[in-house]
Amino acid sequence: MRKPFLIRTGAAFLAMTMLMGTVAMADPEDNSDNSVSTGQYSLELGEASDSTPQASAPLSATAAMAGVSVTLDGYYENMETGDYPLDIEIELRSMMDEEIARKAAVLDEYENLGIAMVKNYLNVRELPSSDNTKSKIIGKMIHDTACEILDYADGWYKISSGPVTGYVAEEYIVTGKEAIDIALEEAKLRAIVKTEGSDLNVREEPSTDSKILEKVSSEERYEVLEVLDGWVKIATLTDEGYVSSDYVDIKYALNEAVEFTPPMTSSLRQQIVEFALQYVGYPYVFGGSSLTGGIDCSGFTMRVMGKFGISLSHSSRAQANQGRTISYSEIQPGDLIFYSRPGYTIGHVGIYIGNGKIVHAASPRSGITISSAKFKAIVKVVNVVD
C-alpha cells in the first residue's frame, strides 16, 4: 500500500533538491559520456551508498533528470512493498512537517524502541514470568508508554523505562515502524522538573508575586502549554499554571513506566486496589459516573468503593467528611487522599495504592491514571475501609 501523501511529497522534494544541486553544477557544453547511478541515496543528499559506482564526470541536466526519475521509481517501488529504510522515511516526513521534525528528537533516546499497546496498563515484572509466586510486579506502563528493549527470550522483553527495569510480555509491546509512528504521534512537549526532590511552585500568573496554585514534584512530567520569557505554562494533573523556567527542562518526551509493587495479599484493601487499577486509561468526564464511559475524581472513588459495599457521596468535599481521618504516616492501600484546587479547600480525591502512588480520575487530559501520591499538597487522608 502506498504511504501517505506527506511521505511521497517528501520524496519528491528530496529528489528535486538533488536535481537542482546537480543541474547547477552541470556544464551545458560537456558532451562526455556520463554514467548515471541508479543506486539508493543516503540521507546526505546526492551521496550514493558504498555499493554504488560514482559518476566519473558532472551530470548533464538531462542525465540528472533521468537519474532522479530512476531513483524515485526505485523509492516508490520500495514504498509500495514496505521495503525501505525507516530513517529515510522519518527524514522525509521531518522535511515536510516542522512539528514532526521536533518530535523526532525523542527517537534519539532509544536504540530499540518499544511502545506498550494496552487498554489500561501493563505489568512490569522482576522476572520473565506471569506467576505472581515466582515473579513480583515492580512497575506499570499505561498505554503508549515507551521503553528501551534490552533483550528478548521466550515471549518476554527485558525493558527499561524511566526508573523501572524488568520484563514485559511480548504480545503487549509494538516495535519497529509501528512504535516509531506512535512515538511521533504521542510525543509531547513536556516540562521535566529538575529540583532534585523538592517541590516547585505552580503560580496563577507568570510572576513570583502571583498566587501559588499548587506544588509539583520531579516525579512527574508536565505538558507544556506555553513558553514565555523566564516562565513556562504547564498542564499539571488537575490544573494549569506557570513555573519558573530555571527549574525545568523542556523537551519532547514520551510516557515512562512508574514504579509499583502491590502487596502480595488477598485482603479487602488489595482487592480495592486491583479493581481500581482495571480502569487506568479510561476517560475523565466532569460529573460523570461511568467507570468505562467517563467519570470524575469523586465519581471514581464512589464507584470503586461501592463495588465493595462502601457507600460514598459523589463529591470530594463530602467524601472528606466520611470515614475516619488519619495521618499520611498511617496510610494504607485503599485509603483516600484529598487535595485542594483553586477556589476550594478540597477539590480532588484519589485512592492510595501503595508505594507512594495513587490511582485517580485526574483530568480530561490525563484520564484515569497512576500518579505520585504527593503530586500536589495533600490536604487530608481518610480511611473509609475499616
Image: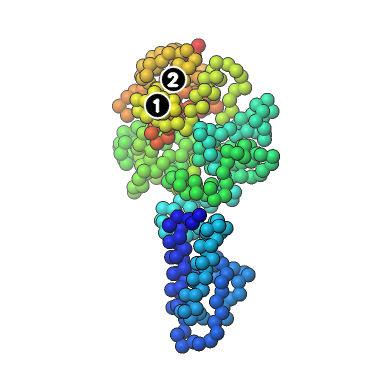
Q: x%, y% of residue 368?
A: 45, 30
Left or right: 41 as drawn, with respect to 9: right
The residue most toward the front is: 1
Q: Which residue is drawn at 44% across and 53% down?
A: 100
Give me the disc on residue 72.
none
Q: Which residue is drawn at 44% across and 69% down?
A: 16
Nearest the viewer among 332 and 209 is: 332
Nearest the viewer among 281 and 32 is: 32
Q: Can residue 65 be seen in this view?
A: yes
Nearest the viewer among 276 and 376 is: 276
Give the residue type at disc 1: Ile
Q: Residue at x 66, y 39 (%)?
A: 155
| Residue wearing tag 2 | 303
Vertical comparison of 52 with 187: above or below: below
Q: For the residues labelled 1 and 2, say whether their Cβ atoms are less than 8 Å apart.
A: yes
- Tally the numbered discs: 2
Q: x%, y% of residue 385?
A: 49, 14
The part of the image, by quadrant, that contains residue 259 is top right
Q: Which colour scheme is used?
A: rainbow
Give the residue type at disc 2: Arg
Q: How crowded is mark 1: few (under 14 residues within 10 Å), some or many (20 or more)?
A: many
Counting residues from the start of the chain, the first of labels 1 and 2 encountered is 1
SS at mark 1 in the image = strand
Q: x%, y% of residue 180?
A: 52, 49
Q: Is residue 90 visible?
A: no
Q: How crowded is mark 2: few (under 14 residues within 10 Å), some or many (20 or more)?
A: many
| Residue wearing tag 1 | 295
Q: Which residue is drawn at 48% across and 30% down?
A: 280
SS at mark 2 in the image = helix
